[in-house]
Amino acid sequence: MSFTDEEMVAFFHEQEKLEEEIVKSVSKTLENIKNPVVEAVLRGISYDSSKHADLYKSAAQIIAVAPALTEREFKHLEEVVRWHIENEEKLMERLREAINKTANDRVKFLLESILADEKRHHDLLNLIMNIIVRGETITDQDWWDIIWKNAPFHGAPGG
């Protein structure tokens, strides 16, 4: 049995609310945290939850109608995505070098967590660029792939 469009939209809105509750809870918890590593990890989880809420909101909108890009938006998006891909590549290379030169296991863990996020960003940007370069209309399936294919698992550092 499959979800109807209405059921999917309702599901996405429920998930969005849950993610927003997580953000509020983590923000409140952060007021009493003094350890910078724990604070950074919790803040990262909060950012991911905020991002997830936005993704659920986008998914609900896609079910109705995915907005088309104008030619101007298309060209701008292509330029921006190319720039981000190039810079993500530089960033990942620098992180790999830093990881290889770092003896402190705790710092290495944090750098590896950041690298995992950057890798997901890079993969997502490449997916968007492949759709743009193809010059095809972005289909509903393309939007689903963009939103969910590289969506990280929730709640762990780096993912």
Image (cartoon, grey):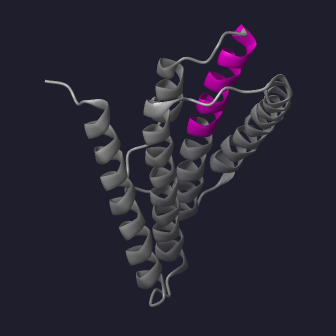
Q: Is residue 32 above or below residue 92?
A: below
Asked whether residue 76 is drawn in magenta, I would say no
Q: Is residue 135 above or below residue 73?
A: above
Asked whether residue 125 is drawn in magenta, I would say yes
Nearer to the camera, 80 or 98: 80
- Which residue appears at 46% of the width and 27% of the height? 144
Whether residue 109 is visible to the viewer of this picture, yes or no, is yes
Main SS, magenta region, reads helix
Q: Quadrant of the N terminus?
A: top left
Residue reaching furthest to the bottom: 32
Q: Position of residue 124 (x, y in %)?
A: 59, 31
Whether residue 159 is visible to the viewer of this picture, yes or no, is no
- Which residue appears at 86% of the width and 28% of the height? 72
Q: Which residues are magenta?
A: 120-134
Q: Is residue 151 above or below residue 109?
A: above
Q: Position of residue 115 (x, y in %)?
A: 60, 45
Q: Indicate left or right for 15 with 106 as reference.
A: left
Figure disc tally: 0
Nearer to the camera, 112 or 55: 55
